[in-house]
Image: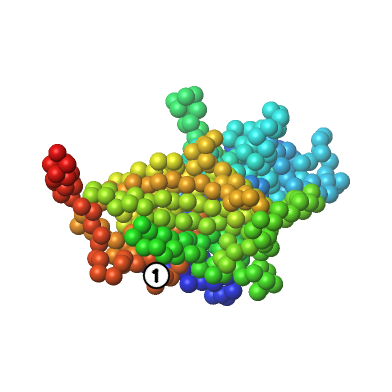
Amino acid sequence: MVISSRLPSDDVPAFSDCFDPLDPNGNITVTFDINQWTQDGYVARVTIQNYYQYRHVDKSGWKLGWTWAYKEIILSMSGAFATKQGNCSSFKYPTTPHSCQKSPVIADLMPDALPENRTDDCCKGGVLAAWAINPSKSFSAFEMMVGNLGANPNVKAPLNLTLMAPGPGYTCGLVEETDPTVSCDVGGKRQLQAYKTWKSTCTYSSFVANQAPVCCVSLSTFYSPKITTCPTCSCGCREAETNAVSCIREGDPAPKSDSSDDDDDTDIVQCTDHMCPVRVHWDVMKNYFTHWKVKLTISSYNYKRNYTNWNVLVQHPGFNQNSKAYSFNSTMLPSFGVSVAGAVALFWGIEYYNNELVNADKDQLGSVSTQILLKKDLDSFTLGNGWALPRRLYFNGENCHMPPPDTFPMLPNGSSSLKPAHSFFILLSYLIFKALVN
């Protein structure tokens, strides 16, 4: 069982902070396709594609930046916008350039953008779905006309690519020339090829993001009265650290929002021993002859934000068999060589029903839950030694703090498996009882 022992105060990054063994190929790929040359530059289509299986880009969306190799400027843009225009007074064009910044920062337009400002696959408010959940919404694109390169320009790829999605944590590689992108036209009957294509891949690290954990795990079972709570200080300690998140005592009202602090992404959570914005609870409910049942509950202690399009990833050997979630969407993911710890199942909400985990308030926590029925492998299933409890849990791509194994709920003394009665003996008992009554 892999258990992270990292506390928010640790200076040394855990292995999973820098590399995710459950999604080793995950990245966000940025592609620049030059599809047209102009008198002093080119027209490029820029695509941002999220290849992370379960890490999505949430509100307030992505921001993409770079530094021009020469003295390029952006003459016009559709499907996105540069956050600063810069000083364009020295450039003589019929219309004012869109941005003359040496290092522009680009943000996505909202879905209600005007038609004249749009382009294909644009305008999603910077939100990108996770690849395994909704591939059709996992990318966004915009077009820009680049100028000020002179006649017959010797174009060069942008430098120092940066990605905020929406906060820090992403590191982007060099923007390098690759094989030109090929697309389809005329209903797929004609292939079009870009003149030139540049690409860069950006990968996420919670260590680079320098953030405390956002979630923790608690456990309970039908065979033990003990409830294993989230470890103390899983996501910070109350007033023990100068960078601890703010908290509100249970039953107290949430603070009134200040419009001047709209860009402040600091969480305000309910005061608890774990101090996490989110808790995931795994409850082993029932043990049947051929199946066993679990209740999975995700609770929000965050007073400040809703978690839209949340997802939870669970690694457990029980998912090697067929399973069914009754109130969540689910899919199985490849285990990439870590199958010893169990198969990997991904759960997310049903649209318009429970795909939003709402914020907490003074009366109650935000909460979504489902029951999961898992088929047994009679050769491996056991309730002993914590087998029925998860090996690893992620919320929105972030590794949740697991309790240590020595605190797990244990079987009663003298019991090895609590195997359910065989249906034959249940039927026999019923017939004997019926005979005695008659």
**Above or below, comparing residue 379 to residue 95 in the picture:** below
* Quadrant hosting residue 415: bottom left
Rendered location of residue 54, percent (x, y):
48, 50
Which residue does the image show at 40% across and 46% down from the upper left? Answer: 371
- Specify the quadrant that holds the N terminus: bottom left
Rendered location of residue 35, percent (x, y):
59, 37
Give the side of residue 127 with respect to residue 95, left or right: left
Which residue does the image show at 57% across and 69% down from the upper left? Answer: 233
Rendered location of residue 382, percent (x, y):
26, 60
Q: Which residue is mark 1?
A: 405
Which residue does the image show at 85% across and 47% down from the upper left? Answer: 90
Give the side of residue 131 with respect to residue 41, left or right: left
What number of labels is visible? 1
Residue 93 visible within the image: yes
* Quadrant hosting residue 139: top right
- Specify the quadrant that holds the C terminus: top left
- Amino acid bearing label 1: Pro
The residue at the far right in this view is: 89
Residue 171 visible within the image: no
Which residue does the image show at 31% across and 57% down from the upper left? Answer: 317
